Image (cartoon, rainbow, N blue to C red):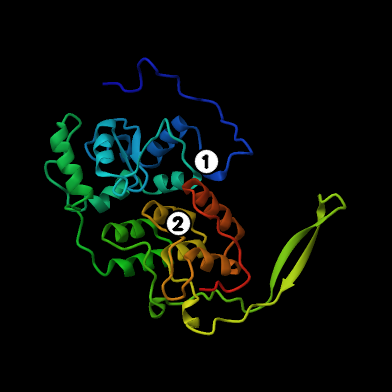
Amino acid sequence: MDFTKGKNWKQPFKGKRKSKKSVSQEEVSLSPSYEFLEEIRQRDPLNKACADCSAENPEWCSINLGVVICIECSGVHRSLGTHISKVRSLTLDLFTPQVSQLMLLIGNQNANSIWEALKPENKPEWNTDKEKRHQFIYAKYVQKRFMKPSEGAPSMQLLEALESKNVLKALEAIAHGADVNDPYPVDMLSNPVSLVPSSNVFLRLPVLDVQGNPYPDKVIDISIPPQSAPKTKKEYYVIRYPIHLALYHHDFTMAELLFQYGSDTHKLDEVTGCSLADLIGYGHHVLQDDIFEYLNNKNRSRGQALISKLNHIPSK
């Protein structure tokens, strides 16, 4: 059956879509939907067939699993819940740049090298009935029956993936059970990054005219002396969380993967008594500025509080 034609079918958009300045980065598609679908198929030839049943020309995907799937399998994925699979249309939905890059990086070949590493028998075909299709997809993604056993502790595998910026290795570690919200023990970190400034921090502010308008070419740098270090548990004021490590490495694709699997920047850090958001804000001097734009676009879309740069140690 051709699902691209029907009563409400429209010609694919072939021109370049103009972005609006009022639209946030989190809402802008990397490219028009049909162009992105074509790019997905060109990047990985296996994306031209459904990852689960090999039906030709699939137009749906799971943005956390990184697979391209057909409309029949997409219905099964939806039934599993968003904690297992987050289904989107490659022709109807918009994708942020980070989600687009995640889909382009993973794709069916890489994803199935993880989820179908043991080469399952009796894999569904395009005309397999719904019950058998559901049984297979449930066994594949929920029971993880076709994955190879983990070669080590999943949490350690995730840490190695974060440090090497290997998104596929991170996906495999998460699939094996690595918790994206668990902090790492300090002694597990090869080179802990301190959140406490070691020297003065410079805050750049615009110079305003008498009407309060900024001069286009005038700024002033204000030197802010470092705050006193925490009196207790100083060793824990370092980057210890997976999402924080991804942001420190300026790896937006890795960060997006972690967010798709439930990373929570407002999680309370039990050791310091601070929220992870406050720890990120306090350690802003070790992060690039566009990290905060990305994070706050995420928080806006989720209805969460924005993360601000802080110049003091968050108190309990």
**Compared to 114, does 5 lie above or below?**
above
Residue lying at the far top in this picture: please name it: 7
x, y percentage for residue 73?
Answer: 25, 36
Question: Residue shown at 53%/39% (left/top)?
Answer: 28
Question: Residue shown at 47%/48% (left/top)?
Answer: 302
Residue 2 circle label:
none
Disc 1: which residue = 27
Q: Are marks 1 and 2 in contact (CB under 8 Å)?
A: no
Question: Residue shown at 56%/30% (left/top)?
Answer: 16
Mark 2 is on which residue type? Ala
Q: Residues within 10 Å of mark 1 (few under 14, many from 20)?
A: some
Q: Residues within 10 Å of mark 2 (few under 14, many from 20)?
A: many
Relative to 39, is 115 on the left or the right?
left
Question: Residue shown at 63%/78% (left/top)?
Answer: 227
Residue lying at the far front in this picture: please name it: 316
Disc 2: which residue = 255
Q: Quadrant of the N terminus?
A: top left
Q: Secondary structure at mark 1?
A: helix
Residue lying at the far right in this picture: please name it: 210
x, y percentage for residue 98?
Answer: 48, 48
Mark 1 is on which residue type? Glu
Relative to 22, is 76 on the left or the right?
left
